[in-house]
Amino acid sequence: MKKTLALLMAGIMLFALSAGCTPSSTPTPAPTQAADTPAPQAADTPAPTATPEPTPTPEPVPATTVTILFTGSSVSDDTASIAEVNKYLAEIGSGLAVKPIWGTWGDFDDKATNALDTGDTSIDIYFTASWSADNYTAYAKKGAWVRLDDPANNLLEQYGADMKAAVPQVLWDGFTIGGSEGRGIYAVPGYKDYAQMYTWDVNNTRLAELGAELGITFDDIPWSAELFFAPEFAAALQMAKDKYGPDFYPLWLEAEPAARSICSTDADPTGLLYYGFDPQDPRKPEKPVIQSRYDTEIYKRYLEKVREYYLAGYINPVLSNQQQANDALTAARQSGEYLISTMTYAYGYDKTVSLERGIDARFPPISQAIVSTGSVQGSGYAVSVYSQNKEAAVKFLNLWYTDSKLAALLAYGVEGTQYVSNPDGTIVFNTDERNAYLPWRNGMGNIFILPPEESAGVNYWNEFKSYNEAGVPTALLGFEFDTEPVKNQIAALSNVRDEYIFSLNTGAVDPAEKLPEFQEKLKANGIDEVIAEINSQLEAFFAQ
């Protein structure tokens, strides 16, 4: 019985243990929270992801168009070239476009001065130089050019650092002048030849034909300024007239440059004064005394001889017409319809111009290469004070002076159309296409980043730089004539000069009659006051 009771008690205990291990269907109450203990928060449920609205495509910002007035151009069709220029400007993200105005040798002066004198806002950048009608120094003093290094708004520093580094310091120094906003830089110098040499421009194709009959060659001729007065020179002109017919004019003279070349005088900012130098040693005279260019013995001698050549039929009468002369001269040179002319030479020009003209063109020196204030200021680009796009204009100049592809497009046209490239980096022009798009290369900014022509050779630009560096400085290098004290006289004298100079310098009028008349009008309008003022300033310059 004890055994039965024991078994019964064991069974009851086993049942109790089994029941305690079985889950209950009734939830166990949660322990009570203390009053200051925050209740646990339920987990945040993520909101459904919204489909993002598409980002609107921004409207393209139109490029700022910069308008430039060039000089010396012979461009009949620029459509494809300028389209490529603006396409490239867009590709590099410049935000710029360019619109050129292709001034010619004949119409640039009037276009530039008329636009500036009327405050034209449509032109942003002008070609300017020591010799152009929109004279660099004179128009800086008038207030026509933006001072690029103005301390109050230094556009050159902000937007032109690259071109500042690309152009030699000697040019920036030469372009630092006294202008309307103080002494500073009023244009970007053209980086081309700053050593200047007067030369003959000889059509040796025709000269060789004449020489075969005379028994002489190009190398037999003493090429100097004195040649102009030699009987042999006149005889060659007459032979050319006889051989090629009465409508052929063998002697083509650009009124002012030709007279300067033969008379050995540098250009001056007034166009009135004799900045004479020794063509064999341009350092002399060491301390020149300035006089009127039109009252020197060499000028009188020049006029007498050029009159003789005009009456003999060697000079085309169109050269005495200021509005037509330059275009006619350019056409005669380009077609090879001349025997001899004069040229203010650029290094290597003979290597390229022969191909352009289809003749054997040669350029024997009249003088040594000189470096003067006028030659250093021989090419530049100024931003107009009337421009509505001054910052964009400087940005464009900075690109143009440093980007070789942009420079080549503007100066040479489209690769594959106007020219083809060789593996050595030189180029060959397609003559027909090039003649339709022919800007003046030496007026195209920084020419040293252009590809050299095959005829010039791969070392052309290094040789060109050496030519610049070998130029002989004149005594007047660094001298800047302040014309302000005699500006009224110069304005009146310039009008007198324009009345006479083309007809006198090309032989169209008798100098025995017209030169005294011209000189008398110069005196009546203040030439003596101008001469006294410049010599006073020059004395102070040499005393420094």
Image (cartoon, grey):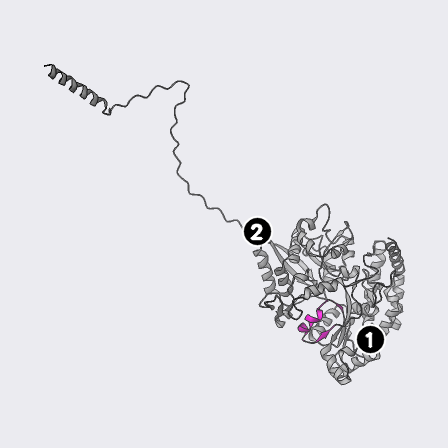
Residue topped by disc 1: 227
Residue 506 in view: yes
Disc 2 secondary structure class: loop
- Of label 1 and label 2, which has the lower sequence position? 2
Q: Residue at x 82, y 78 (%)?
A: 311
Q: Residue furthest front?
A: 3
Q: How many marks?
A: 2
Q: Does the magenta segment cover residue 345? A: yes
Q: Neighbour class for label 1 at 10 Å: few (<14), some, many (≥20)?
A: some
User: Magenta span covers which residues?
Assistant: 343-363
Residue 247 in view: no
Q: Mark 1 against mark 2, which lies toward the viewer? A: 1
Residue 78 drawn at (x, y percent): 62, 65
Residue topped by disc 2: 61
Q: Quadrant of residue 252?
A: bottom right
Q: Quadrant of residue 40?
A: top left
Disc number placed over residue 298 in the picture, else none = none
Work out whether residue 535 or residue 280 is closer to the camera in this orientation and state it.
280
The residues bearing labels 1 and 2 have C-alpha atoms spaced at a distance of: 61 Å
Residue 192 drawn at (x, y percent): 71, 62
What amino acid type is highlighted by mark number 1? Leu
Q: Residue at x 77, y 77 (%)?
A: 219
Residue 47 drawn at (x, y percent): 40, 36
Q: Neighbour class for label 2 at 10 Å: few (<14), some, many (≥20)?
A: few
Disc 1 secondary structure class: helix
